[in-house]
Amino acid sequence: MNTVSNKWLNEVKWDEQGLVPAIAQDAKTGDVLMFAWMNREALEKTAKLGEAVYWSRSRRKLWHKGEESGHTQKVLEIRADCDGDVVLLKIEQTGGIACHTGRRSCFFSKLEEGGWIDVEPVLKDPKDIYPKKP
């Protein structure tokens, strides 16, 4: 992805913490795979690398998707919504797993009859994705 100037970053409407919501969508199927947050540096790195980089609010640091799991996201397009306050990444998901639970999508729970049920299978056990470090 060619980013001649960073002027486009100034057009994003960042929230009071300097973040913007980011949706990762499978470029082929249109399925929403995950939601995360980006700060200015994460969005800029994503555009430069062509791979998704997010801001981890819990760890308070940049998070290159797949840095531990190997399940990187190749970014084919970056879009903004009509208000400029949400970013959409059209991606190719490496390994077919976007969720840390080992599922294809983070949106695997469905509300049915007053309760949440899992409607997508675990493709790989998270223990095999994130082995404990000695």
Image (cartoon, rainbow, N blue to C red):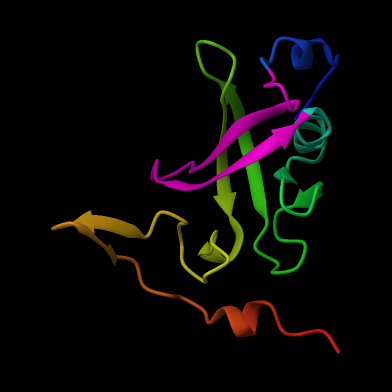
43 in relation to 94, above or below: above
Give left or right: position of 126 versus 47: left
User: Which image quadrant for residue 40?
Assistant: top right
Q: Residue at x 64, y 77 (%)?
A: 129
Q: Magenta segment: does it hold 121?
A: no
Q: Residue furthest left?
A: 113
Residue 123 horizontal/vertical position (percent): 46, 75
Give left or right: position of 107 versus 93: left
Q: Residue at x 84, y 32 (%)?
A: 41
55 in relation to 116, above or below: above
Give left or right: position of 13 versus 110: right
Q: Which residues are magenta?
A: 14-39
Residue 61 horizontal/vertical position (percent): 83, 48
Q: Residue at x 49, y 41 (%)?
A: 27
Q: Residue at x 67, y 22 (%)?
A: 15
User: Which image quadrant for residue 80?
Assistant: top right
22 in relation to 106, above or below: above
User: Which image quadrant for residue 68?
Assistant: bottom right
